[in-house]
Image (cartoon, rainbow, N blue to C red):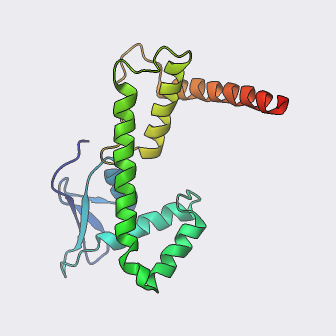
Amino acid sequence: MAASTAPLLIKRYASRRLYNTETSDYVTLEDIAGFIREGREVRIIDLKSGDDLTRQYLLQIIAEHESRGENVLPLDVLTDLVRSYATNAQSVVPQFLAASFEMLREGQSKLMENMTALPHPMAKMPGFDALQRQQQLFLKAMMGGWRGGASGPERDDDTPTPQAEDARDMAEIRRQLAELQKRVSKL
């Protein structure tokens, strides 16, 4: 789904059910997380009061992922966030986090541009193609769903499935790691 310029409007009814105004159906928190991963901006409002509930629901999505063991935020970061609410750092933290994520998105975009630029200065190096493929998969996995995120090359009918590519790449990474471990042990 392409990112739209207007946010997807979700209305919360008194029954706490969430209603997608684009598709005229009810959605879950997981559906909303999916829209966001696809690059959509989402706005959640209370139908009765008109209050913007977006922040509350985004925090709830994060909390649910963290409680299922999908730990993205290290404990020290969570601790510092809690501390920032009780200190003067509260005014600095949001700007810092926003700037950090923007730098991450920009850096990822520039890296992908450099990796796909032809001719790449390292293209003649043995194993460069495998390295480039690994970096693209890594970036895609790390940034998947972010607006401006890495998108891999389009598949054609002769391209192996993503699962086969992942398995092959994982085997190559393991082989390279074993080779590096041998070299380190010789030192």
Q: Nearer the viewer, residue 39 or 73?
A: 73
Q: Is residue 58 left or right of residue 51?
A: right
Q: Nearer the viewer, residue 3 or 120?
A: 120
Q: Nearer the viewer, residue 72 or 181?
A: 181
The image shows residue 37 at horizontal and vertical percentages of 36, 50
Which quadrant is home to the N terminus?
top left
Q: Please give the name of the residue rendered at 37% of the width and 34% of the height, measured from the top-left corner.
A: 112
Which quadrant is home to the C terminus?
top right
The image shows residue 90 at horizontal and vertical percentages of 40, 80
Q: Is residue 151 above or below residue 7?
A: above
The reply to whether residue 9 is visible in this rendering is yes
Q: Please give the name of the residue rendered at 59% of the width and 59% of the height, measured from the top-left corner.
A: 69
Q: Is residue 32 above or below residue 143?
A: below
The reply to whether residue 145 is visible in this rendering is no
Quadrant of the image occupied by residue 22: bottom left
Q: Nearer the viewer, residue 179 or 28?
A: 179
Task: Tell which residue pokes out farthest to the right in this image.
Answer: 186
Q: Is residue 66 left or right of residue 52?
A: right
Task: Tell which residue pokes out farthest to the left in this image.
Answer: 6
Looking at the image, how many numbered discs can be counted on the residues?
A: 0
The image shows residue 127 at horizontal and vertical percentages of 56, 18
The image shows residue 29 at horizontal and vertical percentages of 38, 62
Q: Please give the name of the residue rendered at 56% of the width and 60% of the height, measured from the top-left corner.
A: 68
Q: Please give the name of the residue rendered at 41% of the width and 84% of the height, measured from the top-left corner.
A: 88
Q: Is residue 181 above or below residue 12?
A: above
